[in-house]
Structures are given as structure tokens and as C-alpha cells.
Image (cartoon, coloured by chain):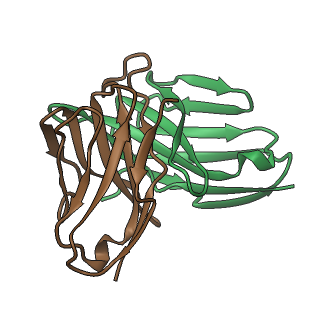
Amino acid sequence: TQLLEQSPQFLSIQEGENLTVYCNSSSVFSSLQWYRQEPGEGPVLLVTVVTGGEVKKLKRLTFQFGDARKDSSLHITAAQPGDTGLYLCAGERYGGATNKLIFGTGTLLAVQP
Amino acid sequence: EAQVTQNPRYLITVTGKKLTVTCSQNMNHEYMSWYRQDPGLGLRQIYYSMNVEVTDKGDVPEGYKVSRKEKRNFPLILESPSPNQTSLYFCASSLGTLPELGKETQYFGPGTRLLVL
């Protein structure tokens, strides 16, 4: 069972447009992370949100953690070709002796110049 | 340079032929983990290790083995590979697993693309 659903799965936009990627779950997470993965490389952490309702900004990227800590969104303003990549959300939940990271299905973003 | 390395990067093998994918990190991290990435399924954890000689199953451990004899190395072993293990594999490491400042950051290796015929 996939605990974290991302939407949309694919997104192709023009340079300068805005976009939002959603990460939804019926489970509560202690924290939520967003990664970006480029072809031939491993995911790279962009941000971690911990508190319900938390908003973090990273230049043109805005990340929000839902009040109930079950969902999150990533908003990109004025997208650029360098934003192209696979965006993954990952929720951390308590798993007994250690916390576990559950990854979402991913959103593949292509920004056309 | 702080990094996680994996070898090989690409591997084609046949069903039943034992193979090992190595993973090494130079950051003195305690926590290491193996994931597989498949289209539409995201990253799924295979095994993880909280420290030397401490390993545990992730969500999809069947058909895999791991060992953690040294802190820096965490090899993934496929004793008898099957075609359904064809996938992109990632090793990752972090200082810890709790959401303390900086500790939760996982560093991923470049990936190993495996094809089992």
C-alpha cells in the first residue's frame, strides 16, 4: 500500500510559469522531506518540515506542511529549466526502534525554455 | 569530499548468479539504508542499519541480504537474483534518524542500475 500519493505524476510547463506539487496521505508523519532527483543521480534533500502548518522558503520554492501533518505541498514560482527533475516527498514515521522514511510516488517536472 | 559511493553503477546478470553491490560513506554516519526505485512506486526501503552489526528489514527485504561489519560499508547481497529484482538501487546514509537539526539529512549514492535476465 502506497502511503504517500503525489500529484501530478508528470508536469510539463514553460519557463516563468508557477506550479504546485501535492503530497497526500491518510497517515500522520513526524516530519516530511522534499527531495529533487536528476537523471543518473540520487535524490538530494531540499527541505525538512516538522511542525504542522509550517512554511519554509528556499529561493523560488515554498514548502508547506499541512496542519494535521498528513500532507504537504511544494510551490515553485517562475520556474526555470534548471528546476527540471523528479520531485519526491518522504514522510518520516515512528517504526519501533527507529523512524522510517516513506517515499511518495514522485512528480516528474519538465520546464521548457 | 563527503559522499556515498556505490559500485558497480551498472550491472547485467543472469537469474541465480549471486552478486554484491557495495556501498561506502566517508562521513562517519551511523545510519545506512538501501532502497530500490521502480517506476510508479517511488523509493522503497530494502534494509537499514543503525550501526555496526545492527541491521533490520525495511519494506521489501525478500531476496536481499546485507551486512554491516564496518561503519563505512554496507553491501547489498542478492544470493539468487531474479528478474523481478531488476531495478535502480540507492544506498543512503545519515547521522541519525530522528528529526533533530541536521541529523535527518540522508545522503544518497549515485545509484546502481541492475538488470537480471
Question: Is B40 positioned to the left or the right of B28 in the image?
Answer: right
Residue B56, picture quadrant? top left
Residue A30, picture quadrant? top left
| A60 versus B24 height, above or below | above
Which one of the lettered chains is coloured green? A
Q: Is residue A26 visible?
A: no
| B25 versus B88 height, above or below | above
Q: Position of residue B30 (x, y in %)?
A: 27, 28
> For the view shown, which residue lies furthest in the left direction?
B53
Per the rendering, the colour in which chain B appears is brown
A26, B105: nearer the viewer = B105
Q: Position of residue A9 (x, y in %)?
A: 57, 60
Please give the name of the residue rendered at 38% of the width and 22% of the height, measured from the top-left corner.
B103
Residue B76, picture quadrant? bottom left
Please give the name of the residue rendered at 51% of the width and 24% of the height, measured from the top-left corner.
A53
Question: Is B62 positioned to the left or the right of B24 in the image?
Answer: left
| A21 versus B117 height, above or below | above
Q: Is residue A53 visible?
A: yes
A112, B23: nearer the viewer = B23
Q: Position of residue B109 (x, y in %)?
A: 45, 45
Please give the name of the residue rendered at 15% of the width and 31% of the height, measured from the top-left corner.
A97
A16, B83: nearer the viewer = B83
